[in-house]
Amino acid sequence: MVSIALMVLDSRQQYMPVVRTTLTVATYPIRYMIDLPSSVGGWLSETFASRRHLMLENEALHQEQLELKAREQKMAALEVENARLRALLGSTAKVQEHTIIAELTAVDMSPFSRQIILNKGSLHGVYEGQAMIDAHGIMGQIVHVSPLQSTAILITDPKHALPVEVNRNGLRSIASGTGESNRLILDQLPNNADILQGDLLVTSGLGGRFPAGYPVARVTEVVRNHDLPFAHVSAEPLAAIESSREVLLIAKPEQPHIDTRASDKEAAKK
């Protein structure tokens, strides 16, 4: 009965977020002590790793660094060309988003949700609704923030939906989670929609939560049943949902300051 009363108060009066935040701060030392053996074990394992393993890893990382440097040089040239073309078209270049690096500390083991806990909170600049990515693509978004920790929902959670578009032709849709770590579904796409197996899905930017242009998933199955109004489309997330330990939280770009006085003067002249 107490639980039911608390749920009713939470849904109608919004009293519980403050209590939840207070309890999160209060239980942080306990969570830290629980995670301490795992952290110490990982530290000891890394400390006593064999010299040969470290040499091989160092060589692989060095080779990867060289490849990334070469790609970076190419990207720099493309950015310069893109900026020049934008100047010719009279448009302004987009401002690159700021990011916050966070580490995964715990995983919600509930079979009905796909959520993780990160080691960064509001004191580090994290806020609710913030987009989360890894090295491969979109992973999810922040749903709860405390001063020292935050909770994120993954794009594979059944309650999560993400506006996407097909990179090949700009076709827009909604990618919904299924509860499975390797499958999303695209809702309400008509049978004649121009979508194919292997198409890349990227964020469309609609809704304002996720910046446009970030990779999300790749279409794995398109089933068209002419007896039904919509096609059945499945996609596999590009992000390493089950293995990523570090993530990037994308901060909202700062809005440019607009001089309203100049606008008023121009309006007065007209």
Image (cartoon, rainbow, N blue to C red):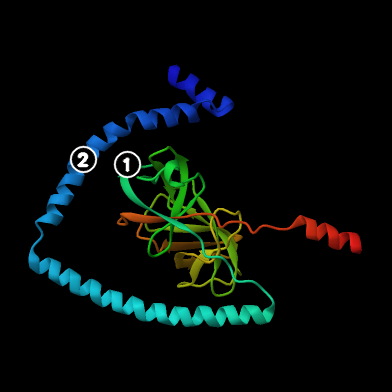
Q: Residue at position x 17%, y 41% from top?
A: 37
Left or right, 254 with reference to 33? right
Amino acid at the residue labelled 1:
Met
Which residue is tagged 1?
109
Q: Quadrant of the C terminus?
A: bottom right
**Residue 60 vertical position relative to residue 50 in the rendered view, above or below:** below
In front: 68, or 152?
68
Q: Which mark is residue 36?
A: 2
**Residue 257 vertical position relative to residue 213 in the rendered view, above or below:** above
Q: Position of residue 20 (x, y in %)?
A: 44, 30
Disc 2 secondary structure class:
helix
Specify few, some or many for label 2: CA neighbours under 10 Å numbering under 14, 14-19, or 20 or more: few
Corner quadrant of residue 145: top left
Amino acid at the residue labelled 2:
Leu
Q: Position of residue 132 (x, y in %)?
A: 44, 54
Q: Residue at position x 27%, y 37% from top?
A: 32
Corner quadrant of residue 171: bottom right
Q: Residue at position x 38%, y 52% from top?
A: 180
In front: 197, or 87?
87
Q: How many marks?
A: 2
Q: Position of residue 243 (x, y in %)?
A: 30, 56
